[in-house]
Amino acid sequence: MSELSRKQQRFTSMVALLITFINQRGYQVTFGDAYRDPRCPYGHPDSTHRSRLAIDLNLFKDGIYLSSGEEHEEFHDYWDDIGGAKRIEGDLNHYSLMHNGVR
């Protein structure tokens, strides 16, 4: 099994833990970008979305979309604790694993 495949499997399990953590705090989530096809015209060409190692999560509370990003702070702290890549300023709904120097 390749290193990338091992990381993808670990990432998937970590996302499940993160979503459970979010739900336990009374929030709901939907997926934003997860896998991004290399033919996609936007995003960084080396994006971890293209390696299946990133996901953007849309956060809701009582059915209302929380767009400021500030609400993700607690969840990024948890993501850091379970081994995720550090947050990217200005892209707070993005959760990823580092791969080839990209997060």
Image: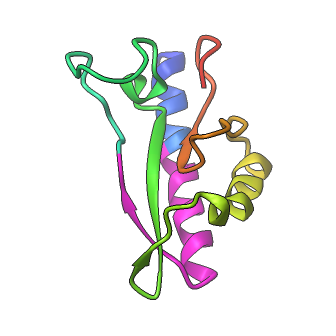
Q: How many marks?
A: 0
x then y, percent, for residue 91? 56, 41
Residue interval drawn in magenta? 12-32
Name the residue nearer the viewer: 41 or 82.
Answer: 41
Name the residue nearer the viewer: 2 or 32.
Answer: 32
Note whether 95 is above or below 21 in the view shown. Answer: above
Q: In the rendered image, which quarter is residue 62 located in?
A: bottom left
Q: Residue shown at 41%/23% (left/top)?
A: 51
Quadrant housing the C terminus: top right
Q: Residue shown at 31%/23% (left/top)?
A: 42
Colouring used for the render: rainbow
x then y, percent, for residue 53? 48, 32
Name the residue nearer the viewer: 73 or 70.
Answer: 70
Name the residue nearer the viewer: 23 or 11.
Answer: 23
Note whether 28 is above or below 42 in the view shown. Answer: below
Note whether 53 is above or below 47 in the view shown. Answer: below
- Whether the magenta-drawn stretch holds residue 17 is answered as yes
| 9 with respect to 71 (left or right) | left
Q: Residue shown at 48%/16% (left/top)?
A: 2
Secondary structure predominantly adopted by residues drawn in magenta? helix
x then y, percent, for residue 57? 46, 55
Note whether 59 is above or below 13 in the view shown. Answer: below
- Whether the magenta-drawn stretch holds residue 13 is answered as yes
| 72 with respect to 5 (left or right) | right
Q: In the rendered image, which quarter is residue 84 located in?
A: top right
